[in-house]
Amino acid sequence: MAGQNLFGTIFLNESILRDRSDDVNDYIFLHEVGHSQFHVIFSVIVFVLRFALMGVAVFSLPALAVSLLVLLAQAPDLTTAAVAVVVIVFLMLLVLTPLIAVSWFDEGSAELFAVSRIGIPQYQKCIKEKRNQSDSGQLKRAVFRLMYPPPKLVVWWAKRRE
């Protein structure tokens, strides 16, 4: 729908933006402008970190899932199986946490920039309208929830910055 390259060019998908109100389009544009508020070196570092951490997650999460299945198949009793599940889930969260942290920092900074320009009430209205108009699937929504900080956290942080 929208994005920005490393050189600061903002891309907006016109066919999707056509269906949204001007307020939501302004919010989306300001969010993308918020990504360019940092120095280009910082943007490159965030891009490289995201790419590297995404690669680690893509390769390690399936391996951990297979390991869990093998451990469950070989577990002699229920206690050992429960410990295996806890350990593997902990390792999966450990793999995802740095990726989520980098993403939340980057996306949260962009959200705070947009909030600083349009105000908290308008931001909340835009988020609600955007969520109501979304026709994305469950997987896309789950990824969105992982990669973007919750709007309530953004509003809380924006109020603290005022």
Image (cartoon, helix red, strand yellow):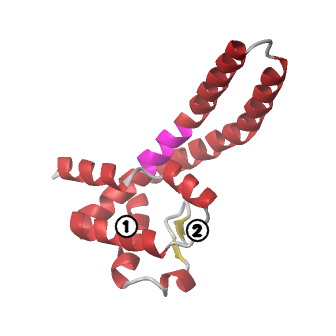
Dot 1: element: helix
The crowding category of the residue bearing disc 2, from other C-alpha atoms within 10 Å (few below 14, some 14 to 19, many at least 20), is few
Which residue lies at the image location 43% right of the left edge and 59% below the top edge?
Answer: 35
Residue 119 shows up from this direction? no
Tell me the tag on residue 136. 2
Region of the chain picked out in magenta, as a range: 98-106
Where does the image place residue 139, in percent across and percent down from the top left? 63, 57
**Residue 88 highlighted magenta (yes or no):** no
Please, what is the three-letter code of the amino acid marked with disc 1? Ile
- Residue 162 percent across, percent down from the top left: 15, 53
Can residue 44 be seen here?
yes
Judge from the rendering whether residue 24 lies leftward or rightward of residue 66; answer left or right. left
Q: Is residue 144 above or below residue 53?
A: below
Question: Which residue is tagged 1?
Answer: 127
CB-based contact (under 8 Å), mark 1 and mark 2: no
Question: Which quarter of the picture shows residue 69?
Answer: top right
